[in-house]
Image (tube, grey):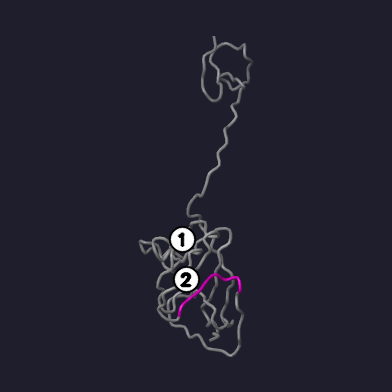
Amino acid sequence: MALTIPEGATASTYKVTNGRLETSKSYEAGKNISAGTAVVIKAEPGNYEFLSTTNTGNSDNDSMLSGTDTETALEADATSYFYRLSTNETGDMGSVGFYWGTEDGSAFTNGAHKAYLKVAKDAADGAKAYPFSNDPTGIGTLKTTEKAGNDAIYNLAGQQVGDTYKGIVIVNGKKVIKK
Protein backbone atom coordinates (compact mmCIF):
# COMPACT_ATOMS: atom_id res chain seq x y z
CA MET A 1 0.00 0.00 0.00
CA ALA A 2 1.05 3.61 -0.45
CA LEU A 3 2.34 5.28 2.72
CA THR A 4 2.92 8.83 3.97
CA ILE A 5 6.29 9.57 5.58
CA PRO A 6 5.78 10.79 9.18
CA GLU A 7 7.44 13.86 10.71
CA GLY A 8 11.05 13.20 11.78
CA ALA A 9 11.70 10.48 9.23
CA THR A 10 13.00 10.31 5.68
CA ALA A 11 12.89 7.41 3.24
CA SER A 12 15.31 6.75 0.41
CA THR A 13 15.75 4.44 -2.54
CA TYR A 14 19.22 3.51 -3.77
CA LYS A 15 21.14 2.64 -6.90
CA VAL A 16 24.73 1.84 -7.80
CA THR A 17 26.37 4.20 -10.28
CA ASN A 18 30.02 3.97 -11.34
CA GLY A 19 30.69 1.47 -8.56
CA ARG A 20 29.29 3.70 -5.78
CA LEU A 21 26.09 3.51 -3.79
CA GLU A 22 24.02 6.64 -4.15
CA THR A 23 20.59 7.83 -3.19
CA SER A 24 18.23 7.40 -6.10
CA LYS A 25 15.31 9.28 -4.58
CA SER A 26 14.48 10.76 -1.14
CA TYR A 27 11.05 11.10 0.41
CA GLU A 28 10.70 13.73 3.16
CA ALA A 29 8.03 13.96 5.86
CA GLY A 30 4.56 14.39 4.37
CA LYS A 31 5.51 12.82 1.01
CA ASN A 32 3.91 9.63 -0.24
CA ILE A 33 5.68 6.43 -1.24
CA SER A 34 3.89 4.41 -3.89
CA ALA A 35 2.79 0.87 -3.08
CA GLY A 36 5.49 -1.75 -3.66
CA THR A 37 8.40 0.72 -3.42
CA ALA A 38 11.23 -0.55 -1.22
CA VAL A 39 12.84 2.18 0.90
CA VAL A 40 15.33 2.55 3.73
CA ILE A 41 13.96 4.67 6.58
CA LYS A 42 16.23 7.07 8.46
CA ALA A 43 15.05 8.50 11.79
CA GLU A 44 16.08 8.95 15.39
CA PRO A 45 15.11 6.04 17.66
CA GLY A 46 11.41 6.17 18.51
CA ASN A 47 7.94 5.24 17.30
CA TYR A 48 6.67 6.53 13.97
CA GLU A 49 3.28 6.05 12.37
CA PHE A 50 3.29 5.55 8.63
CA LEU A 51 -0.25 6.25 7.47
CA SER A 52 -1.70 4.47 4.47
CA THR A 53 -2.98 6.74 1.75
CA THR A 54 -5.01 6.50 -1.42
CA ASN A 55 -2.53 8.83 -3.12
CA THR A 56 -0.30 6.69 -5.29
CA GLY A 57 2.85 8.66 -4.45
CA ASN A 58 5.96 8.70 -6.58
CA SER A 59 7.72 5.54 -7.67
CA ASP A 60 11.41 5.34 -8.57
CA ASN A 61 12.22 3.41 -11.74
CA ASP A 62 16.00 3.84 -11.21
CA SER A 63 16.07 2.21 -7.77
CA MET A 64 17.95 -1.09 -7.37
CA LEU A 65 16.51 -1.52 -3.89
CA SER A 66 14.06 -4.33 -3.18
CA GLY A 67 12.44 -5.70 -0.06
CA THR A 68 10.30 -8.52 1.22
CA ASP A 69 7.14 -8.43 3.38
CA THR A 70 7.76 -11.95 4.71
CA GLU A 71 10.89 -14.07 5.11
CA THR A 72 11.62 -14.99 1.51
CA ALA A 73 14.24 -17.04 -0.32
CA LEU A 74 15.40 -14.72 -3.09
CA GLU A 75 15.35 -16.10 -6.61
CA ALA A 76 18.84 -17.10 -7.77
CA ASP A 77 20.32 -15.07 -10.61
CA ALA A 78 23.79 -15.98 -11.90
CA THR A 79 24.24 -12.52 -13.46
CA SER A 80 23.71 -10.53 -10.24
CA TYR A 81 25.12 -10.07 -6.75
CA PHE A 82 22.76 -9.81 -3.75
CA TYR A 83 23.49 -7.45 -0.85
CA ARG A 84 21.83 -7.52 2.59
CA LEU A 85 21.18 -4.31 4.53
CA SER A 86 23.36 -4.69 7.64
CA THR A 87 26.54 -3.62 9.40
CA ASN A 88 30.03 -4.97 8.78
CA GLU A 89 31.20 -8.25 10.33
CA THR A 90 32.16 -6.56 13.61
CA GLY A 91 28.74 -4.90 13.98
CA ASP A 92 30.11 -1.35 13.92
CA MET A 93 27.04 0.93 13.74
CA GLY A 94 28.99 3.42 11.63
CA SER A 95 29.33 0.77 8.91
CA VAL A 96 25.65 0.41 7.93
CA GLY A 97 25.27 -0.40 4.27
CA PHE A 98 24.68 -3.25 1.87
CA TYR A 99 26.93 -6.32 2.23
CA TRP A 100 26.98 -9.65 0.42
CA GLY A 101 24.36 -11.84 2.08
CA THR A 102 26.42 -14.96 1.33
CA GLU A 103 30.14 -15.69 0.90
CA ASP A 104 29.91 -15.44 -2.89
CA GLY A 105 27.21 -12.75 -3.27
CA SER A 106 24.55 -15.22 -4.42
CA ALA A 107 20.85 -15.12 -3.47
CA PHE A 108 19.95 -15.60 0.22
CA THR A 109 16.85 -15.73 2.42
CA ASN A 110 15.76 -12.18 3.21
CA GLY A 111 13.91 -11.34 6.43
CA ALA A 112 10.42 -9.87 6.72
CA HIS A 113 10.31 -6.13 6.03
CA LYS A 114 14.03 -6.10 5.17
CA ALA A 115 15.69 -4.35 2.25
CA TYR A 116 18.23 -5.83 -0.13
CA LEU A 117 20.11 -4.65 -3.18
CA LYS A 118 20.44 -6.65 -6.39
CA VAL A 119 23.26 -5.41 -8.66
CA ALA A 120 24.32 -6.80 -12.03
CA LYS A 121 27.76 -8.40 -11.74
CA ASP A 122 29.20 -6.27 -14.55
CA ALA A 123 28.02 -3.08 -12.76
CA ALA A 124 29.18 -4.28 -9.32
CA ASP A 125 32.70 -5.08 -10.53
CA GLY A 126 33.12 -7.58 -7.68
CA ALA A 127 32.27 -5.14 -4.86
CA LYS A 128 31.42 -7.02 -1.66
CA ALA A 129 29.88 -4.02 0.11
CA TYR A 130 28.26 -0.64 -0.46
CA PRO A 131 28.39 1.30 2.83
CA PHE A 132 26.16 4.37 3.20
CA SER A 133 29.21 6.49 4.01
CA ASN A 134 30.67 8.41 1.10
CA ASP A 135 34.15 7.95 2.56
CA PRO A 136 36.52 5.99 0.36
CA THR A 137 36.77 2.36 1.45
CA GLY A 138 39.89 1.45 -0.50
CA ILE A 139 41.99 2.06 -3.55
CA GLY A 140 41.03 0.05 -6.59
CA THR A 141 44.05 0.53 -8.81
CA LEU A 142 47.12 2.70 -8.96
CA LYS A 143 48.84 3.89 -12.08
CA THR A 144 52.50 4.64 -11.79
CA THR A 145 54.76 6.44 -14.17
CA GLU A 146 58.51 6.52 -14.17
CA LYS A 147 59.73 9.86 -12.89
CA ALA A 148 62.11 11.45 -15.30
CA GLY A 149 65.48 12.09 -13.69
CA ASN A 150 66.65 15.66 -13.33
CA ASP A 151 70.04 15.87 -15.04
CA ALA A 152 70.77 19.24 -13.48
CA ILE A 153 73.78 19.45 -11.12
CA TYR A 154 73.77 21.71 -8.06
CA ASN A 155 76.47 22.79 -5.60
CA LEU A 156 75.88 22.67 -1.82
CA ALA A 157 74.58 26.25 -1.92
CA GLY A 158 71.75 25.06 -4.22
CA GLN A 159 73.13 26.85 -7.29
CA GLN A 160 72.99 25.05 -10.60
CA VAL A 161 76.48 24.29 -11.93
CA GLY A 162 77.88 22.78 -15.11
CA ASP A 163 79.45 19.36 -15.81
CA THR A 164 82.97 20.74 -15.29
CA TYR A 165 82.30 21.83 -11.67
CA LYS A 166 84.62 20.11 -9.15
CA GLY A 167 83.70 19.24 -5.55
CA ILE A 168 80.60 17.98 -3.79
CA VAL A 169 77.51 18.30 -5.98
CA ILE A 170 73.91 17.17 -5.85
CA VAL A 171 72.66 15.04 -8.75
CA ASN A 172 69.08 13.65 -8.70
CA GLY A 173 68.82 14.46 -4.99
CA LYS A 174 72.05 12.64 -4.02
CA LYS A 175 75.39 14.06 -2.97
CA VAL A 176 78.24 13.09 -5.28
CA ILE A 177 81.95 14.03 -5.27
CA LYS A 178 83.15 15.22 -8.68
CA LYS A 179 86.92 15.27 -9.18
- Note whether 172 is above or below 22 in the view shown: above
Residue at the spot of label 1: 129
Q: Which residues are magenta?
A: 61-68
Q: Is residue 106 magenta?
A: no
Q: Residue at x 54, y 73 (%)?
A: 12
In front: 163, or 123?
123
Viewport quadrant of the C terminus:
top right
Q: Secondary structure at mark 1?
A: strand
In the figure, is residue 170 to the left or right of 44?
A: right
Look at label 2 and name its amino acid. Answer: Tyr
What is the C-alpha distance between the residues marked 1 and 2? 12 Å
Q: 10 Å neighbourhood of mark 1: few (<14), some, or many (≥20)?
A: many
Q: Secondary structure at mark 2?
A: strand
- Note whether 57 is above or below 172 in the view shown: below
Residue at the spot of label 2: 116
| Total numbered labels | 2
Q: Earlier in the sequence, mark 1 or mark 2?
A: 2
The image position of residue 178, as x and y in percent, is 54, 12
- Note whether 157 is above or below 7 in the view shown: above
Q: Residue at x 52, y 14 (%)?
A: 177
- Note whether 34 is above or below 74 in the view shown: below
